[in-house]
Amino acid sequence: MTDISTSVKVRQAGRDDAEDLISVLAEAFFDGPVADWLVPDHTDRRAVYRRYFELVLNHALDNGHVDTTADLSAVAIWYPRPEPPPSLLEHPAALEAATGVYAPKFALLDAVFEAFHPSEPHHYLAYAAVNPEQQNRGVGATLLSHHHRQLDALGMPAYLEASNVRNRELYVRLGYRAGPPLILPTAGPTIWRMWRGQPAATRPAGFPASGPLPRRSAL
């Protein structure tokens, strides 16, 4: 049973929330196996992560759906995936400007995630972050459950990648199941692919197949 905080109010984020939410993302993801792999130097990491998550959040506000809490202590970035949204890889100059000498690993991470993305339509949880001072209080579970209820009403699955065992267990409690793990190259960490289907789904048990989805037609 996952604790849900009844005191947490969830709403859609807007441009005025950007500065606060960039800070939440940068702080929440500062430590961990993926951070150690992407930017081993802690001094560099703080500046790189600030620039990178500014790029990520602005991309999400333009192309996805961003939820936050009333006190801006948490953020969840979702992308509906009947077809792929524009990728950060489609803006290599911006990615390199944000991440500098670490750009190849950021690009590799994005490319690996895209290559193993499920082909079945779903909503993709790209990032979920809680201010470290507010963690372990049910804030993250409440934030995600808000969107899960909307997905359940639509009969829509959800997908994410978990970067550590602690997060993986949280997602299991929220109804996700783990698929085949990914091990990032060049001595990278293990990533757990997670899928949340629908309780009444008739699809056979098993993780959905990966594969490219059709791209948007050029305008």
Image: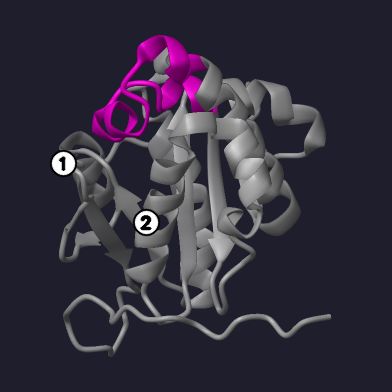
Q: Which span is picked out in magenta?
A: 24-46
Q: What percent of the width, then of the height, locates residue 8?
A: 53, 29
Residue in the picture at 74% in, 29% down? 17
The residue where tag 1 is placed is 187
Q: Residue furthest front?
A: 101
Residue in the picture at 61% in, 27% down? 51
Q: What percent of the width, then of the height, locates residue 37?
A: 28, 33
Q: What percent of the width, then of the height, locates residue 1?
A: 21, 43
Q: Are marks 1 and 2 in contact (CB under 8 Å)?
A: no
Q: Is residue 13 magenta?
A: no
- Answer whether residue 6 is visible to the viewer in this image: no
Q: Dot 2: what SS?
A: strand
Q: Residues within 10 Å of mark 1 (few under 14, many from 20)?
A: few
Q: Main secondary structure of the magenta part?
A: helix
Label ID, residue 160: 2
The mark nearer the N terminus, 1 or 2, is 2
Which residue type carries mark 1?
Answer: Ala
| In the rendered image, the vertical position of residue 188 relative to residue 91, given as above or below | above
Which residue type carries mark 2?
Answer: Leu
Q: Quadrant of residue 214?
A: bottom right
Which sits in the foreground, 80 or 1? 80
- Answer whether residue 19 is visible to the viewer in this image: yes
Q: Dot 1: what SS?
A: loop
Side of 60 where 219 appears, left or right: right
Residue in the picture at 26% in, 59% down? 193
Q: What percent of the width, then of the height, locates residue 19?
A: 71, 23
